[in-house]
Image (cartoon, grey):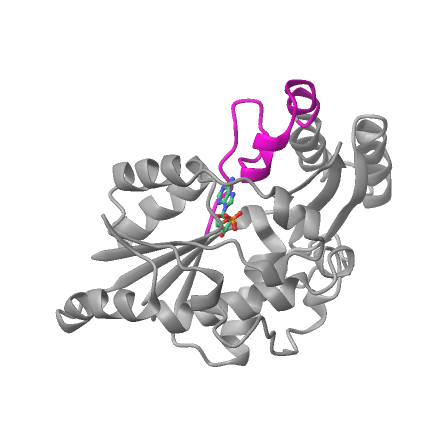
Amino acid sequence: MYLTKTITDLQQHLQVAVKKGANIGFVPTMGALHQGHISLIKRALSENEYVVCSIFVNPTQFNQATDLETYPKTPAADVMLLAASGNHVLFHPDVSDIYPNGMQVKPRNLGPVSTIFEGAFRPGHFDGVAEVVSRLFNAVKPTKAYFGLKDYQQCMIIKALVELENIPISLVFCPTQRENDGLAMSSRNRRLSAEQRKTAAIIPQTLAFIRANYSYYKKDELLLAGREMLLGQLQTEYLDIVHAHTLQPLDSASDPAVALFAGRCGEVRLIDNMLLTE
Ligand code: AMP
């Protein structure tokens, strides 16, 4: 696996692959890698001749300084996992490589999906995500880019960004990888105490309960029961059932639907979601 820190070196290295006409798959991450990330790498390897993974903890998407400071970092383990996965290039730039002129974030109109749920609870978060993804896309210039449906709303934001800026990259959204008890894999899970880790399993249990009962009960009844399940276990920020394509309220029972959750387990903020219809 080729390791590189600068955009110039990365592009020089990729030139050979580009000249050969190789498709380049790209998996952007913030490190502290787990099997969720590796599932994206594997998918990218199955669809491209060359795969680039980036590890960059992007300061502009953190709306709370403490969240940025406490974000887990496991650089040595990341390199081992990536190398074992068959990934070709690890791009791990410094902040000054990605933001050479200061941490400017271009204002973008990413549509109504950007202002609700994560957009409302983490002001500025999606502007930072769109900014860094746009800069990383420019640096890597991939054929296809891979994102996890674990960050469901983020997938929609990236889609909006690609449409807004006419970026010639195909997006591939990959299923959420879960631990044995159903908890969505996340770098943040490392920050949970053993007790909190056990408690956090109530998140997928609640979402699975909603999914299992979706065709039999009214939305409000399910949400009430779901919030009840979470009560006293976690501090729920939102639990909602919305249109799977727009994240707006449902118009009819036949609309594609998704259940979205965000909440805190102690200090650790966790998000998850489940599609309720095929
Ligand atoms: P992050 O390092 O958290 O920014 O995540 C990098 C990419 O991995 C994003 O596209 C995430 O949606 C994806 N990802 C994170 N956790 C999972 C998971 N449990 N299953 C699948 N993809 C994931």
How many numbered discs sit on the rendered protein?
0
Q: Is residue 48 visible?
A: no
Residue in the picture at 69% in, 47% down: 66
Measured from the top left, where is residue 35 in percent x and y? 42, 35
| Residue at x 32%, y 67% (from the top left corner) | 143
- Left or right side of 63 for 128: left
Could you say which quadrant of the image residue 121 lies in? bottom right
| Residue 160 position (above or below residue 85) | below
Q: Nearer the viewer, residue 225 or 184?
A: 184
Foreground residue, 125 or 153?
A: 125
Residue 132's spot in the image, x, y percent? 51, 66
- In this picture, residue 56 sits left or right of residue 153: left
Name the quadrant containing residue 262.
top right
- One can see residue 122 in this view: yes
Look at the image and give the residue range highlighted in magenta.
173-200
Q: Residue at point 64% right, 64% down?
A: 126
